[in-house]
Amino acid sequence: MGGGRSETSALSGAGGGRGITTTQNSQRPNACCFCWCCCCSCSWNEEERRKRRRKRISQDTKMETIPNCEACTKPSAEEIRLWSQSFDKLMKSPAGRNCFREFLRTEYSEENMLFWLACEDLKQEMNKGAVEEKARSIYEDYISILSPKEVSLDSRVREVINRKMQDPAPHTFEDAQLQIYTLMHRDSYPRFLSSNIYKSLVHGGSRTSSES
């Protein structure tokens, strides 16, 4: 558990012989001492990561342009109200995901939604070659400690991913996706419901309903 410990992840793709190796002197906080799914969503670590990313983005003007949002129809006033009933209802709605993603962007944590969406896309892929390519891309974009879009995952989940990346499959990131989903639910969702972004949608939807 010493501070000089080195963290290394070495991955080799099936058949291709390609590898991803990342090494970093471990100055980062240890993973949460409680089980993330029972006691803690590691929100403290997420907040520190968000602060570092905010500073990094402000200094880097070459960050890639944020991709377009998902195609969706305009949500009704009733659908917007349903988003406040449960996080599941919000995440099942393309319009809801877009609005929540816009909020995450203001908190410098949009990568959580982008990672979750990339995992959903991977789970729909059937071609083995495409699966390996998409899995490697997800790893480089969101798992690698060298990525500016790295998501917050505990050491247990990272070890699982490193093992599964030896032979990538559509559900390689299943544990990580669930952990990020839980983090967004517990950490970001309550603030989203109190945000001006959501309140303006509710008020706008109410006005539209009363006028029709």
Image (cartoon, grey):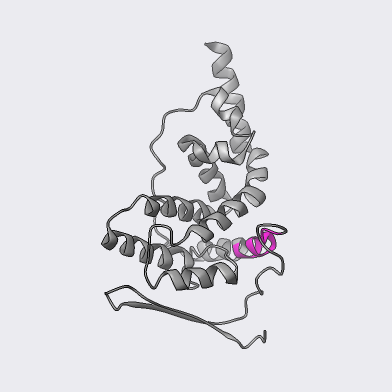
Residue 158, position in %: x, y? 53, 70
Q: Is residue 47 magenta?
A: yes
Identity of the residue drawn at 33% across and 53% down:
125
The correct choice, above or below, for 77 with respect to 96 in the image is: above
Pick whichever, 174 or 149, lies toward us: 174
Location of residue 193 (image quadrant):
top right
Q: Which residues are magenta?
A: 40-49
Percent x, y of residue 5: 60, 86
131 sits to left or right of 10: left
Q: Residue 68's spot in the image, x, y percent?
A: 39, 45
Q: Is residue 61 above or below residue 2?
A: above
How many numbered marks does the figure carry?
0
Residue occupying the point 56% across, 29% down: 80
Query: In percent of the image, x 28 and y 61: which residue is there?
Result: 128
Residue 24 coordinates in the image, percent (x, y):
52, 81
Name the image quarter holding the N terminus: bottom right
Asked whether 202 falls inside the magenta stretch, the response is: no
From the viewer's perspective, tell me whether residue 85 is left or right of residue 136.
right
Image quadrant in which you'd find residue 178? bottom right
Q: For this rendering, which residue is in front, 146 or 161?
A: 161
